[in-house]
Image (cartoon, rainbow, N blue to C red):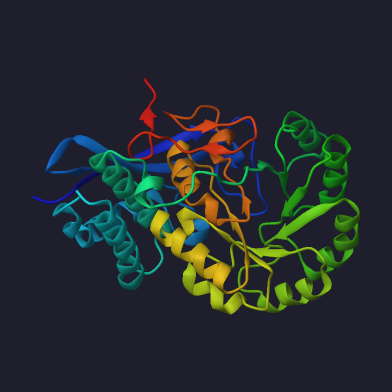
Amino acid sequence: MGLSLSHEVLSLALRDPFRIARSEHAEGRRITTVIVEVRHPDYPDLVGVGEGYPDRYYGETPETMAAVFPLLLAEAGELATDLTEAAWARQHLAWLGATWADRIRGNGAAKCALDIALHDLAGKVLGIPVHTMLELPTQIPPTDFTIGIDEPAVVAERAGRATGFPALKIKCGGPADLATLRAVREVFAGPIRVDANTGWTRADAEALLPELIDLGVELIEQPFPARAYRDLAWLQERSALPIVADESCVAIEDLEALVGIVAGVNVKLAKCGGIAPAREMLDEAKRLGFRTFLGCMEETSVGIAASAVVASLADWVDLDGNLLLAEDPFEGLELGPDKRWRLADRPGLGLTRRAA
């Protein structure tokens, strides 16, 4: 008997409405995420917990994830043979991520959920934190805080509540972008990161660029549609600010096409397939000369804790998805006063499910 998997679809309310330029989910008031649990026949009392965030933009739904899980689990069968050596678990989990990438195209959220659960389970079997198993540092950059599209005064009010964060990420891609950013600058003195989520045209970018520089914006994320490489290159040539690819950079195979096009890339576990693929992708992005942004979806602490494991490899960190939820169903992940996630010293990811 091999590994077994169960999954649960969660619909969770957001603390504040959260819209982006290509929003689809419940008018920005609720999100849908998928939690999985994996069990090993030799360790019946231990459960590995993972999470994948299905985004229709990338072709995923809870239903597609459920359909792919058995295929992914079949490839993971060898993991049931031995989990007693950290080096073996680390190497096999990396091999498994590469195998999934080779044999099943896309489906990043499904891969992510199972990858995280297997890392969590391996850490629990070994009795060590995931970051220790992977030999990664605990010191990571602080996270920024993201605010969705809304009326400029509303965005500014939310920015005023988030002044304890070292940087703010402001969603743009609407007619009030400049007014919104000016309103935010009135209440927040730190770096502002702009994310248009494919919502700009060349004319928008050309008009906004000098204003963004005057406002002290730190970077511009995904201003144009995903495959608009010429537009991205055109803007980066004219911009003193780094242009960061997000929707244009889903998995490791997308990196080569972006060399010489943009200055940075945004890596997300839910896009690329989990902890092991994210580590490989961050390393490869650095090798190719990119600055690296580690991002997230509107996930629970499971997805954020897993992302924090590899955050030491990133230049910028945007791991605030669980902070956007009205109530996080998991506990155990702590945010320090310096807004750095504190990696748990407990086995696995160190999380527990809150009592209902």
Q: Looking at the image, can residue 274 be seen?
A: no
In the foreground, 99 or 174? 99
Q: Is residue 234 above or below residue 121?
A: below
Give residue 169's position: percent from left, percent from top. Answer: 70, 46
For residue 124, what is the image quadrant? top left
Give residue 339's position: percent from left, percent from top. Answer: 63, 36
**Residue displayed at 12% across by 43% down:** 41
For residue 39, what is the image quadrant? top left
Give residue 298's position: percent from left, percent from top. Answer: 54, 42
**Residue displayed at 80% across by 42% down:** 190
From the viewer's perspective, is 114 left or right of 22?
Answer: left
From the viewer's perspective, is 210 left or right of 29?
Answer: right
Exactly how many numbered labels are in the figure?
Answer: 0
**Residue displayed at 34% across by 62% down:** 94
Q: Looking at the image, can residue 154 be seen?
A: yes
Give residue 250's position: percent from left, percent from top. Answer: 51, 65
User: In which quadrant will I find the C terminus?
Assistant: top left
Q: Which residue lies most toward the top here?
A: 355
**Residue displayed at 43% across by 35% down:** 344
Q: Which residue lies most toward the left here?
A: 1
In the foreground, 261 or 92? 92
